[in-house]
Amino acid sequence: MQCIRRQPKRTVSQENILLEQSRRVAALNGIRLGLKDDKDLKFLLKGSHLLKVKSSSWRKERFYKLQEDCKTIWQESKKVLKSPESQIFSIEDIRDVRSGHKTEGMEKYAKDVPEYRCFSIIFKDQRKNLDLIASSEDDANHWIAGLGKIIAHSNSMNQKQKLQHWIHTCLRKADKNKDNKMSLKELKDFLKEVNIEVDDYHAKKIFQHCDKSKTEALEDDEIEEFYKILTERKEIDNIFHTYSDPEGFMSCQNLVRFLYEVQQEEDAVVAAPALIKRYEPNERAKRGNAMTKDGFLMYLLSDEGNIFNPSHRKVYQDMTQPLSHYLVSSSHNTYLMEDQITGPSSTEAYIRALTKGCRCVELDCWDGPNSEPIIYHGYTLTSKILFSDVIKAIKNYAFKTSPYPVIISLENHCSVEQQKVMAQHMTTILQDMLLVAPVDGNKSQFPSPEQLKGKILVKGKKLSRQEDPINGNNNLEAEDVSDEDEAAEIEDESVKTKVEQKGKSDTLKLAKELSDTVVYCKSVHFEGFDDPNHPRAFYEMSSFSESKALKLAQESGTSFIHHNVRHLSRIYPAGWRTDSSNYSPVDLWNVGCQIVALNFQTAGTEMDVYQGRFQDNGFSGYVLKPEFLRDEQTKFNPKSITEGTWGTKKKLLLKIISGQQLPKVNKSKNSIVDPKVTIEIHGVQQDNNKKQTKVIENNGFNPNWNEEFTFDIEIPALALVRFVVEDFDMSTKNDFIGQYTLPFTSLKQGYRHIHLLTKNGDPYSSSTLFVYINIQDCD
């Protein structure tokens, strides 16, 4: 039997010393965050009891406290087999802090408590919301304001500050006996903590170099010396020395030369003094209008040194063209949090999609109890939510991320009576947001996203005997319309059985009130591409399964493009994707399909590419299609590219230089990543390509590759570039570390940092790749 060695009990004076040290560290971290002596921060560091709410019968008191790193929250747990990690969550993982009854849990289980005492923590990943009740309004306000400040101040820290904060937190963690000194063993533990394996010889060499006092322990200035060695960026030093003088200054003139020659910045003369003013920390250099190595590194880590063109972070495209001329960020079965058969439905899924820039959400509507329509995936075991709750969530979050129109895509299976309730909920809840009449008398083509700002459009069935939605209605009360039942296409035996038992009908009785909410997006079955002599009304739109759409793209690419110049097309995943997996949207964007709906809850390459496309144009959810996809006379066919005005062919020269602070994949202390980078091109078939670097063993902290790659890009306007970092594993599938995807047309040239994203598309605080980009016209 193994004996557990007890830690010797500390004396009261030792405890007091440690407590004082902890307070000092917390105060220093507060200063780093720009929150010196902040009363909310002090309250969080002290901690308080909060009621954690899980259900109507589960409401228990737990203690919550901000730790001294000002980055993590400790939560009390009564679980028997709890791990220390399970009691901590990072503030970086928080997406939002909502006051009051703003989550489903609070709405259901805390209505008896005043809103001013309630708040919820919403996480970035698929973790459940943390619903909490404070003992007083003051306590709730401290938590809401304190967390809000820490998140805002952390986000506004530059990369160097984030790195410094992170490293000092790791140093503190490695200092096991909390004596503010670092032994050789603690130094080796620290290196493992920051994801780098150093053999004993090199660890000892670094240690001895820093241990100027020869005390066998590093302290104060010696730890700072160690920090400098660790964070040295030789690859950037080399670039800086090419343009700096012997005293270590880069003059404004030389910075202009670097920006113009290397970074391909056209406004280099104006940009250089502004960059010195913004990023140079040395006052002497700033007065002399010059830049030091530190300022140069700060610039390269900033937004101006990013691989993504900062001018594309705002809306810069023409937003006055017809709606059908744009790709629209769209979600499939938006209500689902997980799979298509048994997973939970939630209003939270709508909030997440809308805050990710989604502009078209889907509602599958069925008759519910008490004459209240419900939303769920018909014929399946997915949970049910109220239609009215979803409309409220859409109203509250539709325009928080983007001001441009939201489309509600209705799949309607309700009785006429409950359809009337649906129409009533939309009109009373959405009020002026709901578009109920044509804009500016426009009757021949779609209005523009600009004209539809702040408006919610309904896509659904329209009574066929009504006059067209653009020119008015008659008084018909209800009639049969063709039914569209995507749920019935699910390839699942239990679903098929239920569909057969129901006896699926091809028609549905439609209430006039619901019909009247449809103006520009009338759902119709696709009967083939337009006969030029009998064109369909522009507001008629069809939905296609991915397989049907891909078949049309393959066999009739140019006709599909012509169709999508005037009409909207919505694409949805195949029925066999019961696990909520996704298909590649690229081939459908290439033929101008606008509403290519993906399962937003499922992370992976397809969603990375999707979010990469829509981070363009200010993350507005609308991206203008290239000219050749907006021209009714176009001869472009992505499957058979001929000579034409599709843009100049490009050659992409790319050098993967180094990586910085890549996260651990396996949280075990001894697990160090072996990173490799893959570069993927997603576009027309000729452009699709993939190349990868060698594997760097045991170094996720500062791996160096220095490898060059070349890609030929036939149609730049349709291409996206994806950088993927993985932890190489000889025996099993590589583990995902991080990725970044962007449109080819948003690439900046020269030396750039790529700020990596997590599996769920959220930014890591300080994980980057350093690359060199050069784009040339092909002969």
Image (cartoon, helix red, strand yellow):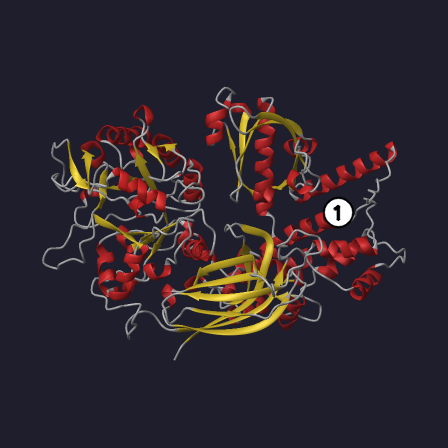
In this view, the residue farthest toward the left is: 533
Quarter holding residue 277: bottom right
In the rendered image of this protein, does residue 294 appear above or below residue 494?
below
In the rendered image of this protein, does residue 403 appear above or below residue 201?
above
Helix, strand or loop for disc 1: helix
- Where is residue 49 shown, x and y percent of the image? 65, 26
- Where is residue 487 shown, x and y percent of the image? 32, 44
Quadrant for the N terminus in the image: top right
Quadrant for the C terminus in the image: bottom left
Camera-side residue of 315 and 706: 706
Asked whether the viewer can see residue 742, the reply is yes
Camera-side residue of 702 and 422: 422
- Which residue is located at x 23 percent, y 36 percent? 517
Quarter holding residue 561: bottom left
In the rendered image of this protein, does residue 470 appear above or below residue 658?
above
- Where is residue 369 shown, x and y percent of the image? 33, 26
Q: What residue is disc 1 on?
A: 172
Camera-side residue of 651 and 572: 572
Kind of residue indicated by mark 1: Arg
